[in-house]
Structure formats: C-alpha cells, structure tokens
Image: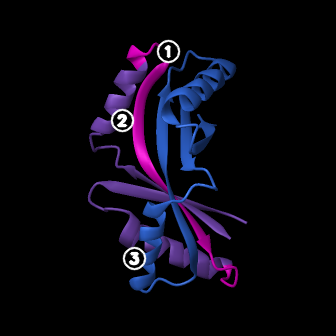
Chain colours: A purple, B blue
Amino acid sequence: MKAYVYVSLKKTVLDPQGKTIHGALKRMGYKGLEDVRQGKYFELTLDGALTREEAQSEVQRIAAEVLTNPVIEEFRYSFAE
Amino acid sequence: MKAYVYVSLKKTVLDPQGKTIHGALKRMGYKGLEDVRQGKYFELTLDGALTREEAQSEVQRIAAEVLTNPVIEEFRYSFAE
C-alpha cells in the first residue's frame, strides 16, 4: 500500500520560494498565473501486512510528528493500493 | 482555479533524501514502512478567466518546461475548483 503525504505552508505564512517561482514564470512569459506556493511531497510505501486502520494511524503519526513543522506547516494525505 | 503539480524522481533514480528519512523514521520506532521517496509539490492559482483547456495546456507547459528536470524527474498534475 502507498501513502502520499503533502506538506504545505499554512495559508497565513509567507512563501518566498513560491513568490520567486511565480516571478520567474511571469518573466518567462507564462500567462494566467495568480499565485504559486511550493510544498513537499512524500511517497511512503507501507508494509502490505498492515490493515487500512493501522496504516492510517501510522501515517497520521508520521506526518504530524516528523514530516510537518506544526508551527508553520499543515499536511494532508491519501492512500493508493 | 487551482492546479496541483507533483514532481518526483523517476523510479530508476536513487533518492538519498528519501532513504535518510526512511532510516530516521525506522530508528525513531515507526513501523510498517518499506520505502520513502520525497518529491516537490506546487500549488498554482490560475486566472479564473482561463478555460479548462487553456489551463490544462498552460499547466502542462509550466510543469514540463520549468518545474521538472526531465532527465531525472517526472510529474503529474490535477485540478481543483
């Protein structure tokens, strides 16, 4: 089973990296962009012996305790077989 | 309209950053993990005046030409209102 964890800066936190990418894309002539924000993305391959509930609680713990800085970041995750 | 672009290393490319995260999680006692790979994630806010087709072709171009290094990375994207 695979779990995908997406970590992004909270909406209220300034994202200078995203702003730089936005500025660069504008200068390069790409149109129609209003904002860019960058985040991180983790692909976790889980032991097939885990039940869906165990996998969910383990991924939730890993995301909340290790992969995310709760002061400035938030996360969401999804599963795929 | 929002577009989400996910950039990850190709399967055949070694991911030392992911390996380090995997090792650290194992040492911290998290169980059931077989592999970890890390990627990047971009949230693009698009001009509402774009049609879905225009948005799709613009995001495809931005992802392929700028956000991804085609030698070692691949991307996928999705849209949300």
Which label is found at residue B24?
A: 3
Q: Which residues are magenta?
A: A26-51
Q: Nearer the viewer, mark 2 or mark 3?
A: 3
* Residue A62 locus on image (x, y percent): 45, 73
> Magenta stretch: residue B43 in it?
no
Give the residue displayed 56% in from the left and 34% down from the top. Answer: B3
A24 left or right of B42?
A: left
Numbered-mark total: 3
What residue is shown with label 2? A18
Helix, strand or loop for disc 3: helix
Residue shown at the point (47%, 68%) measured from the top left:
B19
Q: Is residue A27 magenta-colored?
A: yes
Mark with earlier residue (1, 2): 2
Vertical side of A19 occupied by B75: above or below: below
Q: Position of residue A6 (x, y in %)?
A: 49, 55
- Using the image, name the chain to which the residue with label 1 belongs: A
Res. B1 in view: no
Measure how far apart labels 2 and 3 are at the Cα level: 28 Å
Instruction: For marks 1 and 3, give the CA distance.
Output: 42 Å
* x and y, in percent, of residue B24 in the image: 39, 76
